Amino acid sequence: MSILIKGGRVIDPGRFVGTVDVLIDNGKISAIGPNLSAPVEARTIHASGKLVMPGFVDLHVHFREPGFEYKETIQSGSAAAVAGGFTTVCCMPNTNPVNDNQAVTEFMLERSRLAGLANVLPIGAITKGSEGKELAEIGDLRRSGCVAISDDGKPVMNSLVMRRAMEYALAFDLAVVDHCEDLHLAEGGCMNEGLISTELGLPGIPAAAEDVMVARNLSLSELTGARLHLAHISTAGSVRMVREAKGRGIQVTAEACPHHFMLTEELVRGYNTHAKMNPPLRTWTDVHAIKEGLRDGTIDVIATDHAPHATQEKQQDFTEAPFGIVGLETALPLTLGLVEEGVLSLEQAVQKLTSAPAAAFGLNKGTLAVGADADVVIVDQYEQWEVDPSKFRSKSRNTPFAGWKVKGRVTVTIVGGRVVFEAGVTEQ
Amino acid sequence: MTSPTNKPTERKDEKLIMDAGDISRAMMRIAHEIVERNKGVKNLTLVGIRTGGVYLAHRLVKRIQSIEGVQVPIGELDITLYRDDLALRKDQPILRKTSVPFDMTNKVVVLVDDVLFTGRTIRAAMDSLMDLGRPEEIQLAVLVDRGHRQLPIKANYIGKNLPTSRDEQVQVLLEEDGEDDRVVILKA
Amino acid sequence: MSLKRKDLLSLASLSADEITLILETADSFKEVTGREIKKVPALRGKTVVNLFFEPSTRTRTSFELAAKRLSADVINFAPSSSSVVKGETLLDTARNIEAMQADIIVLRHSSAGAAETLANGVKSSVINAGDGWHEHPTQALLDLYTIRQRGMSFKGLRVAIVGDVSHSRVARSNIYALVKLGAEVRLVGPPTMMPCGVEKLGPKVYHHMDEGLRDVNVIMMLRLQLERQGRALFPTIREYSRLYGLTADRVRLADTGVIVMHPGPINRGVEIAPEVADSLSSVILDQVANGVAVRMGILYLMSGANS
């Protein structure tokens, strides 16, 4: 089966930008150039006026399977991913049981194969049960298919354990991903600490809870030489420290989420549980710093931290409701918003969704080079639409962007040479 | 608001029913009737219903004092909490203070109000009085009785009987509120 | 002027005029509570539900008495924590109660914002009887009523609020209201007990008790949550008491006519010395007595707001 994508504006970050055709054959990119002719049996997709890009790579999603299938499954999460243009997603290990062993990893990969939509790549736990005490069998996790390690929402508080994890992971060339949060400083908190948390009487999470862990992790990375990846940084302090560390040649990559460059803590007013996430929405100062970090390359990657929760969970009172929002189906237009705003060039924006995340985890993804896996997304950059959670492919509806009028929509998503999503067509 | 006491000319949207002189004479007559009916002022007390009734009660106390030389005890009643339409209203009316600074037990209480209409206010006032004490007898004095009773209530002392239609608005305007004393029917 | 609101959730959202209206309305009910028959029929046929997720005998009893004196039917509902575990949300519980045709729900909950969440989900009027660290509007209103009862006017009044402001809903409600009414509000306590950015709401923060109390007209003591000892807010009760306990000597630093308030229950000998709690300047029992009148006023004003 071949596919010829004709006449689109191709953006292959760092390699090529221009209006050419893309030919896909046997699941790989087989040719790229002007006026390609299609083999007889090829399907032709006309993409003139549209953007043709490598499929997006999300380093940070929660697909909740095994254990919390009522929130999301690998099937529903993958459907949401490809609808949002993501062809590769990396799943955090905070499932039940925790993905700290080969059996869970293989289970997830098997579910992904059955779903047959996106490439679902598991991230293994750093410590057994993500309890922060004993290292998980990281070598085994790597062998069975994990692409990075992280204890995500239960960050490793013990700095010695973190040091050993970083050292040990070096043997497998695995990125160590940390959700930077000092659990003591953040204890009980449910929004950014500041005047608004004072007014609302909600326990706060100070920016320092993130900053101190970013500082620690950077020091440990410097000490060990590990490949450190900082998940969803949200504070001006984090951006400043990462910038400084990169300047000194420390190996670190960092990601930011759309909600952290689009929204502030103001949204919590009215005890809006769709504004509850961890790290919390911060201040305008932080939003500006995140944008500046994205612009100057301090922040390499845009990730969604797609965190589905059932409606009844988000209907609880603010302190009881769980942290997190879904993001896969809104990330593209929100990122294109940064292009419109002049923060990023279009190529930079695409890079932060494709080649940069692939490079951070050493994935062979995020490019349209001849011979690469044919993971491609075709986007109508100008299509306007209104975010309607009831239309999400995800099982969950927890988004603060409901009702937003946004611009930029996926028309076709191709994974491994197969069309897995087409706008207006209900997928199988 | 210190307009001269000469006869007020009829204002544009009002039909004048009683002027200051009419009101004054009616109050004097009622004062006499109260004293006569109660054979003096022993055990006599007055309670005005807010807001107009309180002003009239104070006037009656003065007039009774000029007749009998005794100042009878006076109380002020806000009947809001006893209204029968509270549950139907969207916004609750402003409450004013109730103050009946004497023991009503074995006393004659003359309730004083400006206009007697459906009788519902008087029902509320009587319930309120019964919660405040146990008067021996309750009598009712009003400046205007405009008819259309919805409850079996009758005044003992009436300044003026005024036949009205049900949707007309009768207003008693008094100096205490910065108005010239007068009773009017508002024109639609 | 009337209170055109379905709910009473916070004092932050009330205007100075609305606060004054509530205090004036409470005056009328103060008279009612002084009668031999302390009952009026204003809320006859209405149902008031006390929904208390946190135990609080004092506030609950005060609301219950207030509602009964207005002739409302009162139901006390204390959901066991087990029903929360079973997965019933606050809204589920409240909708069940609403189905019993509750006109007013009085809610006490350990989570900030619970009252607002509830109010958005039900047609009944909701009165916040304390939500987490957020607000406790009826307590602050009775505090204000007690101050006014002493003939003090709020404009320029110097009020010291002493203790753990961070974790106090009573303090927040009082701060909002007193600032709106023109008082000079001082917060006194260690920096560990002062919430982030609180000075932007109007008050001035003092870390030294003697300085904070100088020439104040009102001292509001907050209850010290003893279980917070050692949790890094303060080292020991002994030290806290020495630094921030209200003693007779310290009362003398304040204005001569100073009144001492406490939302109760008091820790005698911890935040307040027994001789101060029992002194002439203490109005702690007046606060309790006024609580019923103020809550009657609030229930009355809320009773007509929906339908």
Image: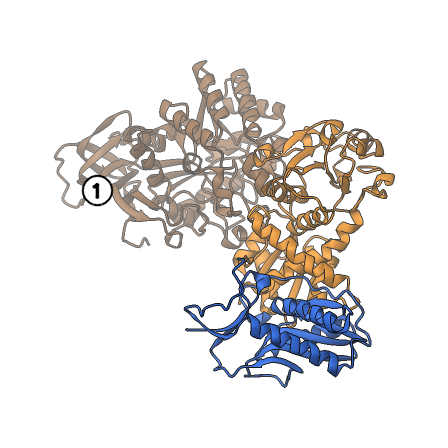
Residue at position x 77%, y 41% in the image: C260
Q: Is residue C42 visible?
A: no
- The secondary element bearing badge 1 is classed as strand
Q: Which chain is brown?
A: A
Above or below A204: residue C173: below
Q: Which chain is orange?
A: C
Which of these two is toward me, A313 or C111?
C111
Q: Is residue C31 visible?
A: yes
Task: Give neighbour class at mark 1: few <14, some 14-19, many 20+ (Cα, 10 Å).
Answer: many
> What x and y, as percent, mark residue A324?
50, 43
Residue at position x 14%, y 44% in the image: A40
Give left or right: position of A399 versus C87: left
Tell which subunit mark 1 falls on. Answer: A
Which of these two is toward me, A25 or C72?
C72
> What x and y, as percent, mark residue C275?
87, 39
Residue that lies at the very extreme toward the top in this rendered image = A248
